[in-house]
Amino acid sequence: MKSMSSMNSGGCRFYKRAGHFLCYTTDTMDRVSQPKTLSPVTLEETRQRVDVVLKSFFKDRIHDATHIDRAYGDLWKASSKLSAAGGKRLRPYMTLLTYQTMGGTQIDEIVPIAAALELLHLGLLVHDDIIDRDYIRYGVANISGIYNELYEPFIKDVPERQHFSDSAAILAGDLLLFGGHDLLLTSTLPAEKVRIAAKIFNNAVFVVAGGELLDTESGFRPYGSIDALTVARYKTAHYSFVTPLLMGARMANCSDTMCNKLEEFGINLGIGYQLVDDLLGVFGTESVTGKSAINDLREGKHTYLIEQFRKLASSAQLEKFEQLFGSDTLSEQGAQDLRKLLVESGAKQSVDLLVDTYMSRTLQTLKDVEIDDIYKKQFETLVGVALKRVF
């Protein structure tokens, strides 16, 4: 009891610990009042907190970049615009929620670290769009798309203009990744905690790069040489789910045993999330998802959906599919024909069933995690948000 400040009031002696006053009777010192469980942070609260940090971050970067040249300031403005255009802030939310769940109370000190994961996410999306030759994100022009319009008066040759537009986007993605690392260093947590946070952040970049490379090469390497679920684990599940969960947990001094359970939860949820994302990339409505539903088919993207089609389709279906799949001139009618084949072969149903399997695994893992029910319900809601997205 020596480490706690105290005061007397009536029949109680109050001791202050972790910002809470605990009441003990003066004769037996039995505790009769305990600090209440903190109300779980909501997704909307997370968005508000994180957006304040991101707004300040981009304001400072735009100011400093403009001093170098107005064009450099414009690049940061484009990144800021894309950041504000969309994004649910799920990764920062998972960080803050897990931190609270594991007993963390200094939420303000964690917000910069949570915001850093949003910059990590945005930087990776910018690079991913270049790889996928996408020019739309969140229903608006992405960095490549913005610069494709900006450079049109100067570069008339379309492939040449796309090259320079993508070059600007590569720089933007790099800056966002390094900006995220810089942002987490602004946390007022003890230096050792910040060091752990930086290590988790850097490991996320390392792992996702491996997953992205496998995903990229799957379009031309021999069929069967790359497993789509392995890609989903390392490209998506690790940085989008495992990293935010472990970040929040480690900042709250989570035990290794508990962190291992959270990692299992994140892997299952993340793979399920990627499977849903693959379906949205083919069957989604662009006005709803904010992303093209034809580019994956034009790129010949090797996903679990395509793996299942090649396993289940008849020879006639395979022949027709290969005539269209991966064609950079694929029309909307051709895309509709491909979607029809994916449904008729049973491939789409197979993916739907696997999503249900991963949902069951995720919820079962959650049952094995010993946390307060008020937090467990938030994680159950998170599973629904991630795996029951609107098409």
Image: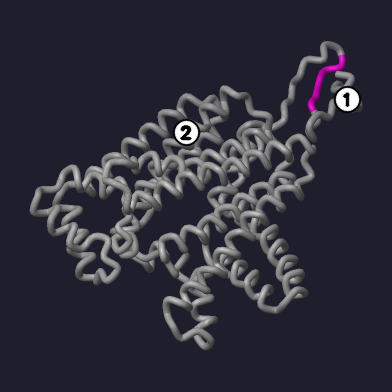
Across and down, in percent, residue 384 comes to 41, 44
Across and down, in percent, residue 290 comes to 42, 65
Name which residue type carries label 1. Gly
Q: Is residue 15 visible?
A: yes
Residue tagged by mark 1?
10
Q: Is residue 156 placed above or below 107 in the rendered structure? A: below
Name which residue type carries label 2. Phe
The local secondary structure at tag 2 comes to helix
Residue 25 magenta = yes
Question: In this orientation, which residue lies closer to the viewer: 331 or 365?
Answer: 331
Q: Earlier in the sequence, mark 1 or mark 2?
A: 1
Tell me if 179 is positioned left or right of 324 in this view: right
Label 1, label 2: how far apart the Cα atoms are? 48 Å
User: Residue, x 40% and y 49% (percent of image)?
Assistant: 215
Residue 102 magenta = no
Residue tagged by mark 2?
265
Magenta residues, start to end:
22-26
